[in-house]
Amino acid sequence: MRPIFFCKMEGTGNNFLIIDNRHNYLGEEVKPAEMPEFVKRLANCSLGAGADGVIIVERSGEYPFAMHYYNQDGSEADICLNGARCLVSYAHRLGLIREKGKFISASGPIGFYHKGETISIEVTPPLDIKLNFTFTIKKKKLRANYLKLGVPHCVIFVDSFEKIDIKELGQAIRNHRQFKPDGVNVNFVKTEKDHLFVRTYERGVEDETLSCGSGVVASAYIATKLFMTEPPVTCRTRGGDLTVDIKEKLYLEGPANVIYDGVYYYG
């Protein structure tokens, strides 16, 4: 068995395992076809280190590095914004970047600004925006909103979380025919006077996570479109606060922290 070194990081409770593969470190042990199974084992809290997702850092000719993101279930996603913020902090720690710049992801170039423990990420413009549509689930009509921020999001505004089973309802919406074939991340949003409170069911994790960066941005963007709030928007999650600013471009800002460096023996 070969030791595989990783860094575990968290951004407002959303946690990730980051592996530096710029020199094909995984090549001999983990073939491309084996990557989904490798990720599933590594991200499993019983069989591996446990995480919401796994980030593989690769070489890039034009940029300091490339980001490849895998969900907990081994599936790939174009981007994870909390993961991207953690990756910027990790790359800064390795000396790959300075205060600001860009790296490449499956969703395209990602601009960033690093200042101490606060990381700001430039978010790609939303696509396929649909406001105030309805669909029926469990004989109940729900009013929702939809957009893509690299990954698809359904945003539903609620008066209270007290009577909502986030996992049960989130899973039902995630798999609803309205969002086939890819499914959707589901954001339940409660508006307060000076902030939004966002809870997210994430596909790929298939459960509620403590925070979801793209979910927070999607929720803030929709809330401004519906004149519920104005930017910059403070978004509270169960894992901490994030700020979304909406100018000519979208920006997500918040903390990213190292939990520990570890070794996983694979084989």
Image: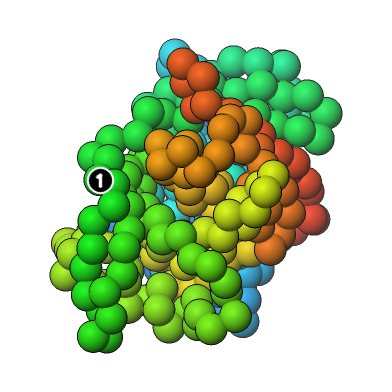
Q: Residue furthest right?
A: 116
User: Does residue 104 appear in this view?
Assistant: no
- Identify which residue is drawn at 53% across, 67% down: 159
Residue drawn at x 61%, y 51% is: 196
Taking the image as shown, residue 213 lies to the left or right of residue 185, namely: right
Between 89 and 123, which is closer to the camera in this rendering?
123
Q: Position of residue 161 (x, y in %)?
A: 57, 74
The colour style of the image is rainbow
The answer to which of 3 and 199 lies nearer the viewer is: 199
The foreground one among 120 and 265 is 120
The quadrant in which the N terminus is found is bottom right
Q: Secondary structure at mark 1?
A: strand
In this picture, is 155 found above or below 227? Answer: below
Residue 245 picture location, percent across and down = 58, 29
Residue at which label 1 appears: 130
Indicate left or right for 193 with 124 as reference: right
Report whether residue 117 is seen. Answer: yes
Q: Amino acid at mark 1?
A: Lys
Residue 149, position in %: x, y? 38, 40
Residue 164 lies, in percent from the top left, at 50, 80
